[in-house]
Amino acid sequence: MPVETWLIFILSFMLIGSIAALEIKDLLSAIIAVGVVGLGVSMAFLLLQAPDLAIVQFLFEIFSVVIMVRAFIKREYHQQSVRKDRIRKTILSIAALVAIFIFSINVFKALPPFGKPLMTTAQYYLDNCARETGAANIVSSIVLDYRGYDTLGEVTVLFGAILGALTILRLKPGKQSNEEEER
Amino acid sequence: MNQERGLTLIAKTVTRISVWLIILYGIYIILHGHLSPGGGFAGGVVIALAFLNVMLTFGHETVTRWLNIDFLHDLEPASGAMYLAVGILGIAISGSFLANFLSKGTLFNLVSSGNILVLNIIIGIKVAMGLFTVVWTLAVFRLYEGGEE
């Protein structure tokens, strides 16, 4: 079977998973459905021959599912309440999606065929990367050599996110200051 | 050993053996980032997941006693600064920011590709310690309800 068939299969699987994650009443089942969607993304990366991305996506999916389960498992908002006017909102969103699809048919016609990219930058990397950087893994050489400045930005983003999380989560009210050494 | 904290004895025994294998696998992925799929980000997440495994099995008090948490907190911004320092060393030695100033070596060797190996190790430390710090803070964090007075 060609890779497009598998991709369509995985994408429909992910669509079902995301709809289930939105519609399931139980919060734990919704978290599991989100995990299914993330594993589908990982499988799609693997089929598109990007194992670097697949590994990172797979690991981060495990990580986020564990954190979400750990964070939500003992809360009172385990059960979601049913909203009132959901039929009207569903019709509105489906109409908006159909309108966007109709407007973007011309864009779909202009897309290049699958596996035939318009950009020719990748061919330069494929030709020259092993000679210029000495790394056998082309993705690693692009991320850390040709685009090293970009990776510095990513590291800074990670640092900022962790700084924000620590800043919010270490806040304690003043009268609990006898427990300060726990932090 | 406090048996009342964490999971059962079976899970603890398995974790005691398997966590070292997971950390070893993470180090393998980081060190082979320039040869095979993977790299600093993936290996760092593997190491962070190993620590998360210990934390889920033994409880966060044991992890707090086992690891030097303050040192790991300091390691996370320090590795970011080390990335910057490697970039500035590139200016000093080779004339451009983040230039690959080390020797390239032969292709497919473990010690090759110059700066990429160094930067992979730095990013691995950064990601592992960053994610572990977030998980540890989430575990220790307790929500205090406001408006009690």
Image: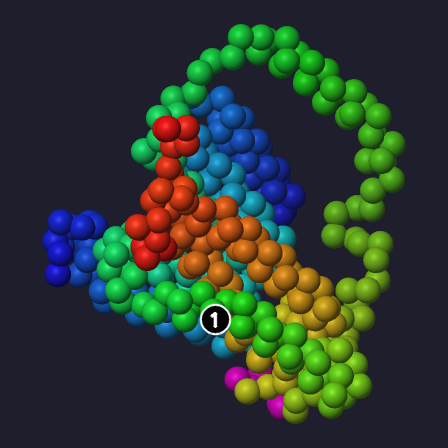
Residue A67 included in the magenta stretch of the image = no
Residue B107 included in the magenta stretch of the image = yes
Q: Within the image, what quadrant is residue A87 found in?
A: top right
Return the x and y of residue A117 as percentages of the image width and height.
Answer: 80, 54
Most foreground residue, A123 or B89: B89
Side of B97 where A9 appears, left or right: left
Which quadrant does the N terminus of chain A fall into?
top right
The range drawn in magenta is B105-110
Above or below, B125 relative to A18: below
Q: Which residue is mark 1?
A: B75
Query: Hey, what amino acid is under mark 1?
Result: Leu
Residue sitting at x 39%, y 58% = B49
Side of A147 where B29 appears, left or right: left
Above or below, A148 relative to A97: below
Residue sitting at x 82%, y 30% = A104
Badge 1 crowding class, 10 Å Cα cut-off, few under 14, some 14 to 19, many 20 or more, is some
Side of A109 where A49 appears, left or right: left
The way the protein has been coloured in the rendering is: rainbow
Q: Is residue B111 visible?
A: yes
Return the x and y of residue B13 as percentages of the image width and height.
Answer: 17, 61
Return the x and y of residue B28 as percentages of the image width and height.
Answer: 44, 74
